[in-house]
Image (cartoon, helix red, strand yellow):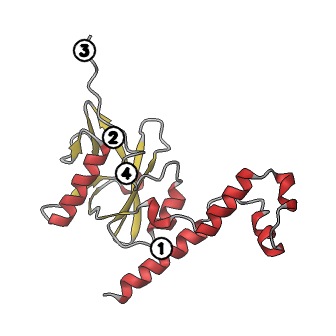
């Protein structure tokens, strides 16, 4: 029996630009604080697609689904010039093209903005660039190690005990991510 030829869709563990089940709204909040050409990969909320590439272009954020057709993955439909056998290779190639100025990548958007759009994918937004502070990670470890009933008996100063006892300890701090991106953006503006 011949195996079915399928594109390699393994992106989760191979790339730091993969953000998982990130909503389009949160992707927009993050990317609006980045420079044009910034992008990330997230899970698609469409039943027909695995991934979506969210990217900043001309001071706006757009979302393009990664489509699978036969043995290829591609952006912009099955007739797209940009296609590859893996999502990671497709995005690496897109970044190379964007930097070489050889040509722009053409995306056909859907919906109210159903026209062709030239984009440049230059700056992958790495999830490592926005890791939580050590303070947050320590609180998380304490909360996961100690039960809720044991928190009050921990030998911690009252302000630290209050911080560790915060019931929203698991919720990612998007404000901190936004602050990091704002600082990075301000530094880029100063260097220009």
The CA span between labels 4 and 3 is: 30 Å
Disc 1, SS: helix
Q: Residue furthest front?
A: 155
Q: In the image, which disc is placed on residue 15?
A: 4
- Is 115 situated left or right of 149 in this image? left
Disc 4, SS: loop
Disc with the residue nearer the chain's start (2 vs 1) = 2
Q: In the image, which disc is placed on residue 67?
A: 2
Disc 3, SS: loop
Q: Give the image location of residue 27, x and y in percent.
A: 49, 60
Q: Residue at x 40, y 63 (%)?
A: 125
Image quadrant containing the C terminus: bottom left
The CA span between labels 2 and 3 is: 24 Å
Q: Nearer the viewer, mark 2 or mark 1?
A: 1
The CA span between labels 3 and 1 is: 48 Å
Q: Residue at x 28, y 21 (%)?
A: 4
* Residue that carries the numbered disc 1 in the rendered image: 181
The CA span between labels 1 and 4 is: 20 Å
Q: Is residue 34 visible?
A: yes
Q: Nearer the viewer, mark 4 or mark 3?
A: 4
Q: Nearer the viewer, residue 75 or 38?
A: 38
Q: Residue at x 24, y 55 (%)?
A: 94
Disc with the residue nearer the chain's start (1 vs 4) = 4
* Residue that carries the numbered disc 3 in the rendered image: 2
Q: In the image, which disc is placed on residue 18?
A: none
Q: Nearer the viewer, residue 46 or 111?
A: 46
Q: Give the image location of residue 70, x and y in percent.
A: 26, 30
């Amino acid at each position: 029996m011949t195996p079915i030829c399928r594109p390699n869709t393994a992106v989760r563990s191979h790339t730091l630009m993969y953000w998982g089940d990130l909503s389009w709204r949160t992707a927009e909040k993050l990317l609006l604080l980045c420079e044009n050409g910034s992008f990330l990969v997230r899970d698609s909320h469409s039943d027909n697609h695995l991934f979506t590439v969210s990217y900043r272009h001309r001071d706006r954020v757009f979302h393009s689904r990664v489509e699978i057709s036969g043995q290829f993955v591609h952006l912009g439909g099955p007739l797209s010039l940009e296609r590859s056998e893996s999502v990671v290779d497709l995005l690496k190639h897109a970044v190379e093209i964007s930097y070489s100025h050889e040509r722009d990548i053409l995306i056909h958007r859907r919906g109210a903005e159903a026209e062709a759009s030239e984009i440049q994918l230059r700056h992958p937004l790495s999830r490592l660039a926005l890791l939580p502070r050590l303070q947050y990670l320590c609180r998380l470890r304490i909360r996961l190690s100690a039960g809720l009933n044991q928190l009050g008996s921990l030998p911690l100063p009252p302000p630290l005990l209050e911080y560790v006892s915060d019931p929203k300890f698991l919720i990612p701090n998007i404000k901190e991510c936004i602050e990091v991106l704002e600082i990075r953006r301000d530094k880029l503006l100063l260097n220009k």
